[in-house]
């Protein structure tokens, strides 16, 4: 009977470890009380992201529905922060509300484990803005001086090594050497702390630590949770793509894509298209960028208006004047506008026409933006359309 349950547990662990990204998109919020969130942040050497909201707040609801559910936002905040959200008008959150009184909603805060506010923002944010907000907070974080001092003095206590690696990663500083030095001194990795160090230290896919993570995946998933392992694999592969871009190394690009295909197969196709687009955008290679974008649209985005519009805006940001890119962007922007019907989409289409020198169609599309549902109540959109129309005169 024991062997039967043991085998069942192992099979379940492997299944969960290979599960795709869509089982847990967006920010995962910790459900405990504020002191418990602080204890978790302290134990994991993380900062805390706090969403202070009210149930009646419209911008709060929009962020919860569209920003906190964004996969890229979730990936970033789940990796770097302990995330909490508190309805500031509920009695059970009174302790947090007393410590951090707010005058408007939503108020977004990043705090350290001791409760000190690292930075604060009042009002709703876009997905890109929220990620930038978090990145700035991480930049303000520093390596724990006490931990660093002990390590430099020769202390190799496993708990301290793990804290040091976490501290380095949080401050966006190299940690692979510290990780490798610890692991090279070990004969096996069958203890709890070694598995934690492998998980925390696997920051690049083109590394021995990453290979150890994959080799010990079932055991680490059973100990730390499959989602944490999946998140780390994806992060490491993305970091290798960044390195490929930095050094213009196509070999590293292919290695990252291959390792996602092997270890996270349900994410592989989208990851590959995204990686190729980033690589070719950095290389200013419009032809191959467009080829990757077309594959991404055909296989991933299809005719989803919101994602199609997002793709178009990225294309315009990277290659604002390339004729082939503009021609493709025009077709997709037109589809997004006609199927999505939003004023923002029509304004983007109008901008493409303007870039191509077609003032007549640019004016028509801009006027359609003003006639779109909700456009007359959107003061920002109306102002932008008015300014845009003036550029056509």
Image (spheres, rainbow, N blue to C red):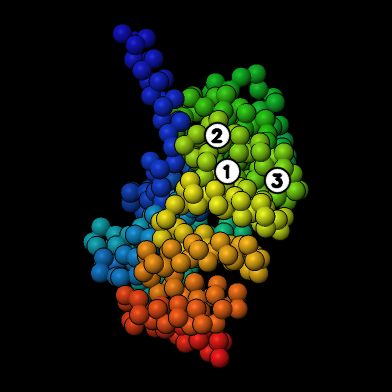
Quadrant (top left, top right, bottom left, bottom right) of the N terminus: top left
Q: Eyeballing the image, is 51 above or below 359?
A: above
Residue at 33% over, 48% down: 32
Residue 232 seen from this side: no
Q: Secondary structure at mark 1?
A: helix
- Going from N to C along the chain, the mark reached first, 3 or 2, is 3
Which residue is labeled 2 in the image? 261
> Where residue 28 appears, x then y in whole percent?
39, 48
Mark found first going from the N terminus, 3 or 1? 3
Q: Is residue 262 above or below residue 141?
A: above
Q: Position of residue 105 (x, y in %)?
A: 35, 71
- Outermost residue on the left side: it is 91
Direction from residue 29 to residue 253 in the image, left or right: right
Q: Residues within 10 Å of mark 2 (few under 14, many from 20)?
A: some
What's the mark number on residue 244? Answer: 3
Q: Which residue is mark 1?
A: 272
Rendering quarter of residue 378: bottom left
């Amino acid at each position: 009977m024991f062997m039967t349950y043991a085998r069942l547990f192992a099979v379940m662990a492997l299944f969960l470890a290979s599960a795709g990204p869509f089982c847990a998109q967006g920010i995962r919020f910790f459900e405990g009380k504020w002191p418990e969130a602080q204890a978790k942040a302290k134990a994991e050497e993380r900062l805390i992201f706090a969403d202070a909201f009210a149930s009646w707040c419209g911008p709060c609801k929009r962020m919860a529905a569209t920003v906190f559910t964004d996969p890229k936002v979730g990936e970033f905040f789940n990796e770097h922060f302990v995330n909490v959200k508190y309805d500031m008008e509920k009695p059970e959150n009174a302790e947090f509300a007393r410590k951090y009184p707010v005058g408007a909603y939503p108020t977004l805060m990043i705090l350290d484990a001791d409760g000190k506010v690292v930075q604060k923002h009042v009002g709703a944010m876009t997905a890109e803005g929220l990620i930038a907000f978090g990145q700035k907070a991480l930049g303000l974080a520093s390596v724990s001086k006490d931990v660093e001092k002990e390590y430099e003095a020769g202390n190799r206590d496993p708990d301290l090594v793990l804290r040091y690696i976490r501290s380095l990663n949080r401050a966006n500083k190299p940690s692979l050497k510290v990780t490798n030095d610890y692991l090279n001194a070990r004969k096996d990795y069958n203890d709890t702390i070694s598995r934690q160090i492998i998980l925390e230290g696997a920051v690049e896919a083109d590394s021995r630590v990453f290979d150890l993570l994959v080799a010990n995946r079932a055991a680490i998933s059973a100990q730390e949770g499959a989602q944490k392992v999946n998140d780390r694999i994806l992060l490491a592969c993305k970091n290798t793509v960044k390195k490929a871009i930095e050094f213009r190394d196509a070999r590293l690009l292919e290695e990252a894509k291959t390792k996602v295909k092997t270890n996270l197969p349900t994410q592989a196709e989208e990851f590959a298209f995204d990686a190729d687009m980033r690589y070719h955008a950095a290389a200013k290679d419009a032809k191959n960028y467009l080829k990757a974008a077309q594959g991404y649209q055909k296989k991933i985005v299809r005719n989803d208006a919101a994602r199609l519009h997002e793709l178009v805006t990225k294309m315009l940001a990277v290659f604002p004047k390339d004729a082939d890119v503009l021609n493709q962007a025009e077709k997709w922007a037109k589809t997004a506008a006609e199927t999505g019907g939003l004023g923002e989409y029509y304004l983007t289409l109008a901008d493409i026409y303007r870039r191509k020198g077609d003032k007549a169609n640019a004016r028509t599309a801009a006027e359609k933006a003003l006639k779109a549902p909700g456009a007359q109540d959107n003061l920002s959109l109306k102002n932008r359309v008015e300014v845009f129309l003036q550029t056509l005169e």
